[in-house]
Image (cartoon, rainbow, N blue to C red):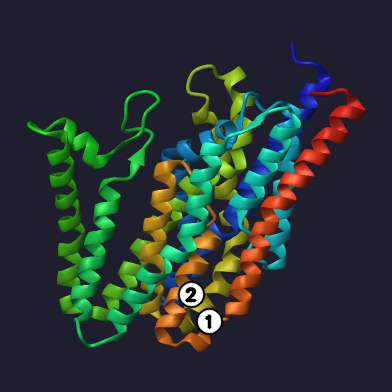
Amino acid sequence: MVDPGTAALMIVALGASFFAAWTIGAGSSGSTPFAPAVGANAITTLQAAFVVGLLGFAGAVLQGAAVTETVGEGLIEGVTLSPLASAIALAIAATYIAAGVFKGYPIATAFAITGSVVGVGLAMGGGPAWDTYTEIGIYWLVTPIAVAPPAYLVTKLLRGDAVSERAVVTVLAAAVGLVVANMEFLVLGPPGEQWSLAAVAASRLPGSVTLGIGATSLAVAAGFAAPVARAAARDPTRTQRRFLLGLGALVAFSAGGGKVGLAVGPLLPLAEGAFPVAAVIPVLVFGAAGILLGSWMAAPRMIKALAQDYSELGPRRSIAVLVPSFVFAQIGIFFGIPMSFNQIFIGAMAGVGYAVGGDTVSERKLAVTALAWIGSVIFGLVVGYGLYAAVSTLTGTV
């Protein structure tokens, strides 16, 4: 039987986790993906909020396992997060994220939660997971820099006359298809593994698995590109809007898969005691429900506000932002790296800004934002360590 103190800590952890998931749904994962489509009048604000909630839920359940396992078990070595540690880490992160959402600041969720989890883990006596930190650090450092050039190039191509818009959009659709074919899903693989559509198809084809994956990927890419090419030839404007809708759907799905682990990862060690087999599934469903409610309850206001910005940005530049953002988000999900969509989007927006004229980009604001993200990690780490040490000393709770 669980003692009252432990039960209370678990309730606090569950509440903080759900609130963190709610703020994620209310924030970037619930508002940004469909804002360009709303700005282009391809879908209404309420329709966008409804759809993005469902897609975020689906992405969280089907693609959220890798990041959840990293946050819950991969950031600290030698110890397992206790109910107290989970409650403190989640409470710090949820408060910090909520402050950013409601004040309108671009808080990097991944930075805040990663810092708080590492802080409480170190305070418990755990050791640093240097290999994991190296992977995360490289991704965080490279992503905002690497996402800008493709956004810049796509903007130049869509706005220029050297290549037809139909050809550019068709190639982009094919690139998106290649990524979709290789997205890994929890339900496709054997127990405990995630497989992609291409991997499943290749396992059923004769010959080399590598060739099978390549052939399937090309087939899916062609399946995405062909209808887009035909539609662009008939009605380019309508095709832009539909392409924005499709990209918004994929980004919303990816946001659920990439960010749910930030909210529920610290719950995973607790869930493994209650669910010895496949503990990650109920944890993902719990977080997905929070994202869904956050999207439905709070995202419409933010979608409407962002849609005004994207309507000024225009459908071409919006496409240039969403395509590389989707690709880089899926890279992070594939490697199980905690990610911030704010970081990805801001990098892509900077690339678009430089493509249309450097005076549209505030380098000072970018620098301040980057410092704020670094501060998020330090804040979570220091407060998590100090708060856990203080509470555990005062209460004698581990």
Q: Residue 300 in the image: state x and y as whole percent.
A: 57, 65
Sequence-first disc among 1 and 2: 2
Q: Nearer the viewer, residue 142 or 69?
A: 142
Which dot marks residue 80? none
For numbered disc 2, what is the local secondary structure? helix
Quarter of the image where one finds residue 97: bottom right
Instruction: Give the farthest residue toward the top.
Output: 1
Which dot marks residue 361? 1
Amino acid residing under circle 1: Val
Quadrant position of the C terminus in the picture:
top right
Determine which residue is flagged by label 2: 350
Amino acid residing under circle 2: Ala
Q: Residue 262 in the image: state x and y as whole percent.
A: 58, 44
Instruction: Answer whether labels 1 and 2 touch (C-beta < 8 Å).
Output: yes
Q: Residue 154 in the image: state x and y as whole percent.
A: 32, 74
For numbered disc 1, what is the local secondary structure? loop
Q: Residues within 10 Å of mark 2 (few under 14, many from 20)?
A: many
